[in-house]
Structures are given as structure tokens and as C-alpha cells.
Amino acid sequence: MSTADDAGAAVNAPKKKQRVGSSSCLPSTLAVIDLSDESLTGRPRKPPLLRRTASHSLFHFSSSSFAADFNDQSTADVVLALRLDHQPSSSFDCDDAFSESTSIASPETQIYLHSRVLRRSKYFSALLSDRWQQKSDAASSMDEENCFKIHCITHRIPAIYDSMDDYVTVLKLLYSDDLLFAIDNLSTALDLLPIALELLFEDCVKACVRFIEAVPWSEDDEKRILSLIPLLSEEESKELLARISPLKNDSSEEMLHGLILSAIHSNSNMAFAKAFVAKLLRDFSSRETARKVLDAAFDKSLRVVKQSLEEYSSPDFRGSHDETEVIQRLNLHTAMTNLKHVLWLVERMIELRVADTAVKAWSEQASLTADLRRAFLDDLWRAFFPGLPSVVLRCTCRLASAVVTGNILAARQVRMKLVRDWLPVLIICKERVPIMGSNSMPLYVELEDIFLRIISTLPISDSQELLQQCLSFSTRNIDDCPHLVDAFTTWFRRANRPAQADLSE
């Protein structure tokens, strides 16, 4: 046969069909007929001896699950030459002459296989089919001694592979009925899967996918898996996708919402749960998602507080005194518990700088502040929930402080209503909560100072009305309230300036 015929046979050899799609990680390979072999000279001969140019042994499996006739020269009817198709790396194109002269010698290994086994791979089944053999009579030669054809195939291994070990492993698995025996770790499964996909070895693909789906992954493993998923069928990739890709877009939101509810309602080790969720919120990538979840939880807890205090302040039930007291205690307990939730949520919002909605909502609680004032006029809370005023004032102090520091840029109306509605609560707490003793004084003074600073941001007419209500801050003597003195001094300085019409002239 002429050299031109040889070249024609190589060029006309069929290319591998894509199994599911194409991917840069699985370059197509070409199986060609090795016409330079002595088997085509017409002289009867036995298959050539194993020729291996690689420097290390590839056949190191000792598992009994592999059939003994793998690489058995005496019974094989297929000689497969595996050739590493390595080329020198270069960032520029070279002409053909330069490429040929500088190409790296390709390591090659010949393996003796059996067509009946290779047909488990749809890729080899197509190469060995009668239709292909009729078109390429030169693809085989007769072993006259054993009376069977010997097929010679060269398979080029893409340059992305450093060795042919994994290819040999997949070929060995063709002889095995227990594929999972050889796939004993995730690295092996990820190494074999692209080769099994390339050779259309479906049983091996299924075994690799099954192993990958069942074990934990590192972040690097996950990246490799993501690159292979497009090559898998929908059924094969379903479990993998379910693990790394949500079925809906609000999964993160649902998870955060559940974590927040678990943290604030946890009965055991609540401090640890809250600290853990707080860290997750700080590290969460989407601030808008965190804002949405925190706003929803804040609104829910605040509604429960309002409902409980409304029922406490305006009971619509009748019964004995003992029954009434039990129900009222339950209302106060519910309000106290949910106010603690509100305080924790407010602190998380301020930390993430997403408390603007909470500030606005807190400034629109005229009915809640009225109910709180009525509740503090009774004595029931003193006996059972003495910390209730402190929690109320801390919530107010955190939000008002965020406004003063610029953490939250609140509109003028929001700032004014925040002081107007919550200032009476602060005043009645100072008057009615001596049980808290001196420990409460720093909180009172802090909130007084914050309210006065907010008042200083309002127009003179609004601040005039609110400052008059702040006279109760001077409860002992003038030396105890320098913040109040400064607030009035500032107001009078501004009020004594000429009117705006005069300044514009």
C-alpha cells in the first residue's frame, strides 16, 4: 500500500461524536489505523511484543476483580497504541517545519485487548463495527496461526494529561464487573470520569457519578465537578446539581430567615446561637438579602410586642382577679421576650448599616409608646419583669444613636417623630423606675444626650417644642445636666439671629 493511501486512511478515520456536549476539557481524539506495523506485510506472525516508551509501569493493579485476560498477548485481537500527544507550549503560532523539528517525542504504550470487551465502550464499538471495517480493510490482519483478525488502533491522548495511567485504568475497568471496587476516592472518580465520557463508557460514567455524589467535596473538587456537569445527561447530573445549585433564587433568604428565627427563639445556649448567626450575617455576601430578612424578622417581633402591650393596656376579658393577673403577666412576658428579639435584631441591622427601615418604623409607634406609658404606671411589671424599661430604652437608644452618628440618614420628619414619641417614655421611666438604681443612670443620660443632639438637627420651631419637654432631665441640680445646658445655649444662639428674610437682604 502506498504512503498516500496510508495518509488517506488516517484522514478518513471517523472522529468521536460528542456524548452530551462539547467542552474544552475534553478535546476530541482521533482513532487511526497504524499502517506501519508488520502485521500488514502479508507475512503470518504473532502480535508484536509489548512496546512501552514510558519510564514507569502502568500495570500495577492487583485486584482480583479485574479479568486475567487484560493485556493478554496470546488471546488479544486488538492492539491499542496509547500515545501522549504532547507538544511544546508556546504563546505564538509556529510554521509546520519548526513545529515538526521541535515537537517533543510522544511516549507510547501498546496494550493487548479484546474486541468483545472493548464493545462496552460505544466509542470502541463504533471503531470495531462491521460498517467501519468494510470501509477500512487495512484496519486488520489475519493471525493465521490462531485464525482471527488483529485490529491495530492508535489512540492519541490530549496534551492536558500528564500520563496515560488514567486511560489504562479505564481500559482495565472494561474488564471488570465491579467498577466501584477501583473507584475508592474522589480524586480517582474525578480523574476517570472525563476519560469515561470521552470513550462513551457508560457503566464507568455511572459509577464515577455515583461515587462523586455520595462523598464530601472541597472547593477545588467542586470547581472540577462544575466543569464536567455540562457533559453529563440530565439524569446523571440531577443529584450533583441539587447539591450545588438551588432550585429557586430565594434559598439563601430562606436559610437566613430560618437561622435568625432559630437564634432568637433558642432556649438552650442562646448566646452562642446568636453570636454564630451574627457572624454569618457579617460575612454574608449580599447586604440587600440580609436587610430583607432582618426587616421581616424585626417587623414580626415588633407586631407581637404591640399586640401584647395593647392587650395588657386595654383588656377585653372578664374574670376573677387571679385569672386577670395571670393573663396580664402572660402579655407582659410575651412583650418582654419579643422586645429582646427586637433589640438583638436592631444591633445586627446597625452593624450592617441596614437599620433605616427599623428607624422609620420605630418613629411611627405613637400607640405603642402610649401603651408603654400606661403599663409603667402599674406595678405588675415591677414584680415580674423589672428589666422591661431597660430593654425598651436600649432599643430606642441604639436606633437613635445610629441616627445621630450618621449610620442611618433619617429624614427630618423621622428624626422629629422619633424624639416626640419616645421622649415621654424616657421621662416616665426616670420617674417610675427607682428600682433599677444607679445602674440605669448611664443609660438615661446617654439617651437624653442623644435626644438633645437629634433636636439640634431640627428646625428652630420644632426644637423649641421638644426642648421644653426636656426640662425633666435636670432632676437634681444644674451640674448634673451639662448636655441640657448646651442644648438650650445652642437653641438660643440660633434663635437670636436675625430672621431669614433679613439674612437674605
Image (tube, rainbow, N blue to C red):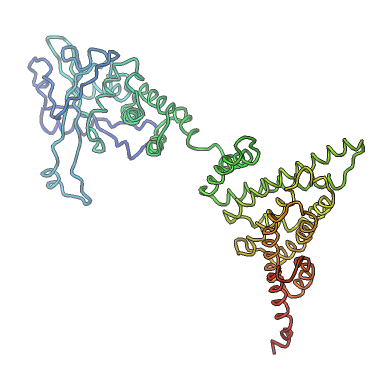
Q: Quadrant of the N terminus?
A: top left
Q: Farthest top residue?
A: 146
Q: Residue at x 60, y 55 (%)?
A: 350
Residue 479 vs 161, above or below: the answer is below
| Picture coordinates of residue 183, whole percent (x, y) | 34, 23
Q: Nearer the viewer, residue 466 or 66?
A: 466
Residue 327 sits in quarter: top right
Q: How many marks?
A: 0
Q: Residue at x 23, y 38 (%)?
A: 159
| Picture coordinates of residue 102, whole percent (x, y) | 12, 44
Q: Farthest left residue?
A: 43
215 with respect to 501 (left or right): left
Q: Nearer the viewer, residue 502 or 38?
A: 502
Q: Quadrant of the C terminus?
A: bottom right
Residue 234 vs 337, above or below: the answer is above
Residue 301 sits in quarter: top right
Q: Farthest bottom residue?
A: 505
Residue 225 vs 70, above or below: the answer is below
Q: Residue at x 12, y 46 (%)?
A: 97
| Picture coordinates of residue 384, whole percent (x, y) | 77, 42
Q: Nearer the viewer, residue 465 or 205?
A: 465
| Picture coordinates of residue 40, whole percent (x, y) | 11, 22
